[in-house]
Amino acid sequence: MLEHGGNLRDAGRRFGSHEWVDLSTGINPHWYPAPVVPGNAWHRLPEADPALAEAACAFYGAALMLPVAGTQAAIQALPRLRMPSRVTVAAPSYAEHAHHWAAHGHTLTQTPFAELDAALARSDVMVVCNPNNPTGATVPAPQLLAWADTLAARGGWLVVDEAFGDTAPQQSIAAHGGRPGIIVLRSIGKFFGLAGIRLGFVAAEQSLLTRLGDELGPWTISGPAQHIALAALRDEAWQRQNRAALAASGARLQTLLRQAGISSSGTPLFQWWPEPYAEALWRHMAERGIWVRLFEHAARGIRLGLPADEAAWQRLQTALHEWTLR
């Protein structure tokens, strides 16, 4: 199993007991306040509620969407829906994409963002995180749509993982998910801070969504998860407030890093930078009870999410200052 953020039990085993500041995930630390769940949501089999897909379409601007048990479920299932293909995955990016395409008989190539256009001619499927995780790099929507048209003309797919896209909806191509060859993945976990309910959505043509739904099987989304997500997707006031708050927090984080001599990139939810002493900095932070995301390989560097409160901000600032004095 690949390594991910949020693994505080591992942090405790390796570095002892701390009141951890978890900056390892890039998830909104101020999660949506989940409403009270009706008692029968725990009792009934969780039949699909059409209102959930309708609310997702309204929020993401898509014509059709399939709820899935987190975008991870779709990432694992999509490679099973194609015969062996030539697959280009933008790199570095969320490692689960390359892992699962490679595991299902496809010919995988991991390609830097700057070389994706040249790779199009030798690809049947192209996978892009936009904005990218962990670097925050983006591809303009017109470029993505042009790639999708080229791929679709030969029966190919463009898979765009927009898990971190809720803070910049103008970059999304979810509205074009009904066009042939376009598959867009969206996540409730990041912007809404509801990673624990395991819910995401896929925008695509109806025929592909039907195949994906059949592959995933029945009862994939729990009743409580449907109830909570429906409230979150409809709460426009909370969404506006949190987009503004996250923009301010993201700018504060980037400024804090700049003051420590670190030039970073990212989104309002996280910052990343290539770090020549990545392991040493990761250990420095962990010894002070701050859990950050270490990337040892393709995206060699450090990613930080947002502190949850002022005390956590101050602990991060102190730890960064101590790092500069080493």
Image (cartoon, rainbow, N blue to C red):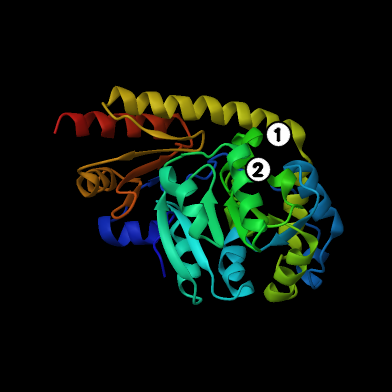
Which of the pair 18/113 is nearer the observer?
113
Q: Tell me what residue is drawn at x 66 percent, y 64 percent.
A: 155
Q: Earlier in the sequence, mark 2 or mark 1?
A: 2
Q: Where is residue 81 in the image (x, y as percent from the top left)?
A: 64, 73
Q: Where is residue 19 in the image (x, y as percent from the top left)?
A: 37, 47
Q: What residue type is labelled 2?
A: Tyr
Please say if 97 is above or below 105: above
Question: Can you say which quadrant of the picture contains the N terminus?
Answer: bottom left
Q: Residue at x 42, y 54 (%)?
A: 5
Determine whether label 2 and label 1 are within 8 Å by CB.
Answer: yes
Query: Crowding near pointer 1: few (<14 within 10 Å), some, many (20+)?
Result: some
Residue 138 in the image: above or below residue 229 = above
For label 1, the residue is: 238
Which residue carries the number 2 mark?
32
- Give the x, y percent position of residue 243: 62, 31
Q: Nearer the viewer, residue 128 or 317?
A: 128
Residue nearest the observer in this picture, 4 or 60 = 60
Q: Is residue 51 above or below residue 309?
A: below
